[in-house]
Amino acid sequence: MRQVIITAALTGAVHVPSMSPYLPITPEAIAEEAKAAYEAGAAVVHVHARNPETGEPSSSNELMSDILERIRSKCDVIVCVTTGASQLMTTAERLLPVEVFKPELASCNAGTMNFVLSEIAEKIDDGFGWEKPYLIKTRDNVFKNTFDGLQHYIETMSEVGTKPEFEVYDVGMINNLAYFKQKGILKGPIYIQFVLGILGGMPATVENLVFLKQTADKLIGDYVWSVAGAGRAQFNMAMVAIALGGNVRVGLEDNLYIKRGVLAKSSAEQVAAVRTIAEISGHTIASVETARAMLAIKNK
């Protein structure tokens, strides 16, 4: 039986607190979410920091340190630290947590793109005052991930022993990774997270996921992959990924619902659901130890 790695993305920088009372924003709430997701079957948790008073995405190392310490005290899950804390932050701000905390795993966005969240602003009542301006600003912003920046991310992560998780939103980003592999800057096995359904990236369809996998097979070769479907596409993309031999990311960062019209009370609910899908398909869930081996994460 194949083993499937489940990642839980706990809070992110896309959704805002007005959208769900269950979105965790304090260090303690995020750590509790990590523990619950781990107990439900997640081998990896993907973490962002937020201002605990307002829920606004934060690049504070103090907050991230608090989150990481709390998670470590509760469970031995693999923690993937974001370098996409907010698309409105500078490259230096986004990379600093990797340099400071040297996590086992960190996200690395594989190319520049439009990453538009402004449509959400039309659907919420802004209870904190920052939410609508934050979301609307993404309409005239470019999520900048240049080749110089990517090389800096890759080399920094290599120096501190952190495995990059490359977030791929469109097919050209696979070509970017192939370039760095060909130059000898990026060593395998490469870990790719296909992220589908973001406005500005590829739509979340079966055809697009198959195309991305086929392209990565040809251009990358030695890689491990997972898929994150945004919003209502989450579980559809999860089922296709499992069928195609991939791994799965779920969590409140990507989707606030457990089924149509019903808010998920935690990322753990979604982990449990995708675990069921995997197990009834004849697969088992990768333990933390197995996931470390599959992703070739260095022992710290």
Image (tube, rainbow, N blue to C red):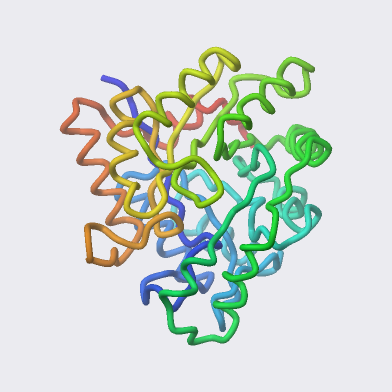
Q: Residue at x 40, y 41 (%)?
A: 204
Left/right placement of residue 12 relative to residue 235 reads right
Left/right placement of residue 52 relative to residue 58 reads left
User: Percent from the top left, x then y, of residue 58?
Assistant: 65, 68
User: Percent from the top left, x then y, of residue 271?
Assistant: 31, 49
Q: Residue at x 54, y 76 (%)?
A: 55
Q: Where is 43 relative to 35, above or below?
A: above
Q: Quadrant of residue 168?
A: top right
Left/right placement of residue 171 relative to residue 75 reads right
Left/right placement of residue 24 relative to residue 275 reads right
User: Percent from the top left, x then y, of residue 228?
Assistant: 43, 43
The foreground one among 287 and 110 is: 110
Q: Residue at x 49, y 42 (%)?
A: 195
The foreground one among 95 and 182 is: 182
Q: Where is 14 relative to 53, above or below?
A: above
Q: Residue at x 52, y 62 (%)?
A: 14
The foreground one among 207 and 285 is: 207
